[in-house]
Image (spheres, rainbow, N blue to C red):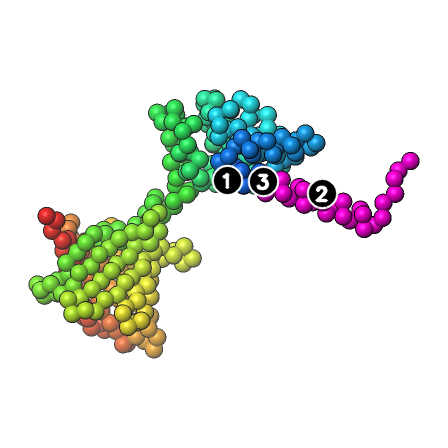
Amino acid sequence: MYKKYSIATVISMVCLCFVYGQNNDDKMLAHFNAADYSACIDVCDSILTVDKANAKANFFKGASLIRTKNYNTAEAYMLKAKENNFQPAVFVNSNLLRMYAGQQKSELVLRQLNEMVSNGFNSMAVLKTEEFDYLNDNKEFENLRSKVDASANPCKYGAEYKKLDFWLGEWDVYVKGKKTADSYITKSEGGCTLHEDYRTLGGYFGRSMNYYDAADQLYTQIWIDKNNGKIEFKETSAKEGYLMMMSDQGDGNLIRMSYEKDNETGNVTQIMESSSDEGKTWNLNFNGVYKLKKTN
């Protein structure tokens, strides 16, 4: 005969179970993030004693065992987490990958990694863990790792992101043979943006951000100066060592700007022109030669 409970009692019991589960979830995550893997395993075991199929407990126990190099013991738990659809699935697959590498099961590592690369895997941090050190001379692994790096850092590899890279460096800027400004061209980590910090000897300064805009597939520059003046340029022509860009100011007013590298001297010439008749005629506004600063 079943014991009867009031609705309030049932709700209270459900809430307690929910809180208990939430607390254990929080404990697993907290211990794991603190690298207290022994404590994390203890919490997982307390859950798995009553719920062997619990996806989170299986995952965190397996992941903790991998971190403590107990690769063979970890396998059953990580596969159980995968069987019970732990999410995000990439976390399970990444840990399985580390586990196979720790076991030095090269065939499984390469098969698993190839599948993950096909699905857009882009975590270089996983592949930099010590489990993969033994594969450093494996050509297939190196090829797959390069694909992961390209997925994680597309701007480092695509030619479209490098159209102005010939301008990188520290420069003295000359107009009509006389130095007028200093310019520092740098690239952001990952290579997605190129920046110029420009300052004239008279105190005017500004900064440009240059990048490939995937939306219109054009190289783009946004310039902002000390007076909050802003101009946006879009690529009109590009080839190796050369880039021309244009800004439409409205009412038939255009500004075009070109950069061209001299391969013999290494200098870069920047020319700016303006038109008030939709490009029928052009007036020269700036002709500057960027010369690399001499290093001591």
Q: Residue 111: x percent and y percent?
A: 49, 28
First in sequence: mark 1 vs mark 2 = 2
**Viewer-closest of 294 and 116:** 294
* Residue depicted at 38% across the width and 27% down the height: 133
Q: What numbered label is drawn on residue 27?
A: 3
Within 10 Å of the Cα at label 2, are there few (<14), some (14-19), or many (20+) other Cα atoms? few
* Residue depicted at 76% across the width and 45% down the height: 13
Q: How far separated are the C-alphas under marks 3 and 2?
A: 15 Å
First in sequence: mark 3 vs mark 2 = 2
**Viewer-closest of 248 and 25:** 25
First in sequence: mark 1 vs mark 3 = 3
Q: Up-down: is 100 above or below 179? A: above
Mark 1 element type: helix
Q: Can residue 111 be seen in this view?
A: no
Quadrant in the rendering for residue 39: top right
Is 142 displayed left or right of 173 in the figure?
Answer: right
